[in-house]
Amino acid sequence: MSSQIPRLEECDPDDPDQALLWATQYIPVAGKSPMVFPRMIAELISRHYTECGIVHAPSLARLANSHGFIHVDDLPKQTKKFMRPYRGQQHPLNGAGGWVAMDTEEEPPVVIQDPVAMTVHEREAQVERLRYMGYKVDEPEPEQPKARVVEPDDGFDPGEHTVAEVVAYLRNASDPERDRVIELERGGQQRNGILKRFPESGRP
């Protein structure tokens, strides 16, 4: 090839490195300088498009586009295809995607298991694995005690419950039951959080 700037008539159509070399230079960019590739990069692009089944067909330009390039579907020209990333984000910068041989089967997508659907043993194994990899995984917060209302026939004993539980129970208790519980509290732990809320209960 005599010219440093390859022309169509100088490029060998049977050489993948030259077949589309002439079209890979001075690519126009709106409002900016044209995009120029070094010769080595331009040859790689020419080979890549050729392997993708793109050929120069000026006689079929009216069926393809104004530049006369078409993709050949029914001829054994294409030798590789693009395979989307089988894991991670579907993004051009995801290295899990790329060009592979035509007979390559697609990788099945990686399914991330929902921890909610795991057993306790499986979740613990995942947590330990993450810690091994350097992730900081805290233990779950212990469940805080919650106030609950216990029916009178349960024989409610304030000494077996927290202040919050006793107060919640007394708010819904009958007067006799409230007096009984307060009397037990006065004879037991004598917690101000209970006795000061019900000062009149339990007294004769």
Image (tube, rainbow, N blue to C red):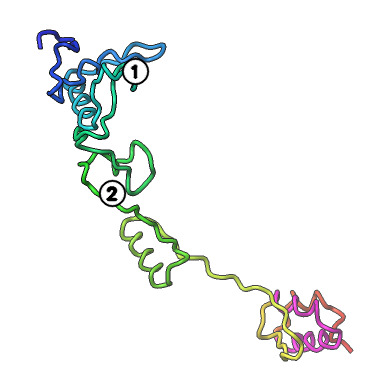
Secondary structure beneath label 2: loop
Query: Is 179 rendered above or below residue 87?
Result: below
User: What percent of the width, then of the height, locates residue 81?
Assistant: 25, 38
Q: Residues within 10 Å of mark 1 (few under 14, many from 20)?
A: few
Looking at the picture, tell me which residue is in the foreground, 148 or 21: 21
State which tag comes first along the sequence, 2 or 1. Answer: 1
Query: Is 121 rendered above or below residue 1?
Result: below
Residue at point 59% right, 70% down?
144
| SS majority, magenta | helix
Secondary structure beneath label 1: helix
Image-quadrant location for residue 201: bottom right
CB-based contact (under 8 Å), mark 2 and mark 1: no
Q: What type is the residue that disc 2 sits on?
A: Glu
User: What percent of the width, then of the height, locates residue 52?
Assistant: 24, 32
Residue at point 56% right, 70% down?
143
Residue at point 38% right, 63% down?
127
User: What percent of the width, then of the height, locates residue 167?
Assistant: 75, 76
**Location of mark 1 (residue):** 62
Query: Is 184 rendered above or below residue 113?
Result: below
Instruction: Give the quadrant of the C terminus.
Output: bottom right
Numbered circle sitting on residue 16 = none
Looking at the picture, tell me which residue is in the foreground, 123 or 157: 123
Instruction: Give the quadrant of the N terminus.
Output: top left
State which mark lies toward you, 2 or 1.
1
Looking at the picture, tell me which residue is in the foreground, 66 or 63: 63
- On screen, residue 128 versus residue 50, left or right, reads right
Image-quadrant location for residue 46: top left
Disc 2 to disc 1, how far (Cα)?
35 Å
Q: Residues within 10 Å of mark 2 (few under 14, many from 20)?
A: few
Range of magenta residues: 163-188
**Location of mark 2 (residue):** 106
